[in-house]
Image (cartoon, rainbow, N blue to C red):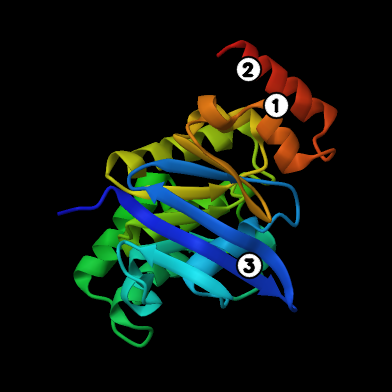
Amino acid sequence: MKSDVAIAINNLTVSYRQRPVLRSITAKIPAGKLLAILGPNGAGKSTLVKAILGLIPKDSGEILVLGESDVKKFRTRIAYIPQKEQIDWDFPVIVRDVVAMGRYHARGWFAWLSADDRRLIEQAMQEVGISDFADKHIRLLSGGQQQRVFIARALVQQSDILFMDEPFVGVDATTQNAIFVLIEKLKAAGKTIIMINHDLSILKKFDRLMLINKGLIAMGAPEEVYTEANLQKTYGGQMTIVDQAETTLWQAKL
């Protein structure tokens, strides 16, 4: 029987250089939903994602992904799109090769791609609208086109969960909307999408919000957790005037 929980986190604590970055996080992320993780710089958002992926060790607590605690058993079922600054844009690779990396998760890095693999790769590039750039170096693409490349890689990986770390940085509103259309298609197919996000103006597009600042502040539907009290606990004095105005307008429409 398929679980309605994609990720279960119980009493998670993670430290960096012996200083706690996350303290006693307990949360259940529902399957098939679009979740935004919100918090100020240094709140532990990326640390939380990396701990879930098994990329960094945890001090204590338990993480179950798709019912498994062993990262080796669920790693192939997760796709991860890191922050742009974490990607080596000078690495000599074209768009088609980046998308193809999604198939190596299942087959191994030294396996030959089958005809079915190549069909999936071409189909994914066509679906996200990057077929015309297939033979270009990824560095030559715009920010929005680069994000589409990594979404295509996630498609061919056929993962159940997609993590996206600030995918809209440097992307204009038109491209942002186009990416959201792709994300909605993934969600309609039953995928769970978890996104680290800083843009408070787009929160109505999400099914769930997770507010963190070292610990879990609140989690739930936007209309439940997107309150001035929770935002004050999360951001303190770090909210900009624009963010505060956007929050007031958004709440007035509820």
The N terminus, quarter of image: bottom left
Which callout, 2 or 1, points at the residue further toward the start of the chain? 1
**Depicted 202 relative to depicted 187: above or below:** above
Cα distance, mark 3 to mark 1?
35 Å
Q: Residue furthest left?
A: 1
189 displayed left or right of 141: left
Question: Residue 87's mark?
Answer: 3
Residue of label 1: 228
Dot in front, 3 or 1: 1
Which amino acid is tagged 1? Glu
Secondary structure under the numbered disc 1 in the rendered image: helix
Dot in front, 2 or 3: 2
Percent from the top left, x then y, of residue 104?
35, 76
* Quarter holding residue 252: top right
The C terminus, quarter of image: top right
Question: Residue 1's mark?
Answer: none
Q: Which residue lies furthest to the top in this view?
A: 252
The number of callouts visible is 3
Along the viewing direction, whichever of 231 and 117 lies nearer the viewer: 231
**Depicted 232 relative to depicted 117: above or below:** above
Secondary structure under the numbered disc 2 in the rendered image: helix
Along the viewing direction, whichever of 229 and 158 lies nearer the viewer: 229
Which amino acid is tagged 3? Ile
Disc 2 to disc 1: CB gap under 8 Å: yes
Which callout, 3 or 1, points at the residue further toward the start of the chain? 3
Cα distance, mark 2 to mark 1?
9 Å
Q: Residue at x 63, y 49 (%)?
A: 143
Percent from the top left, x then y, of residue 120?
27, 60
Residue of label 2: 251
Disc 3 to disc 1: CB gap under 8 Å: no
**Depicted 247 relative to depicted 253: above or below:** below
* Quarter holding residue 246: top right
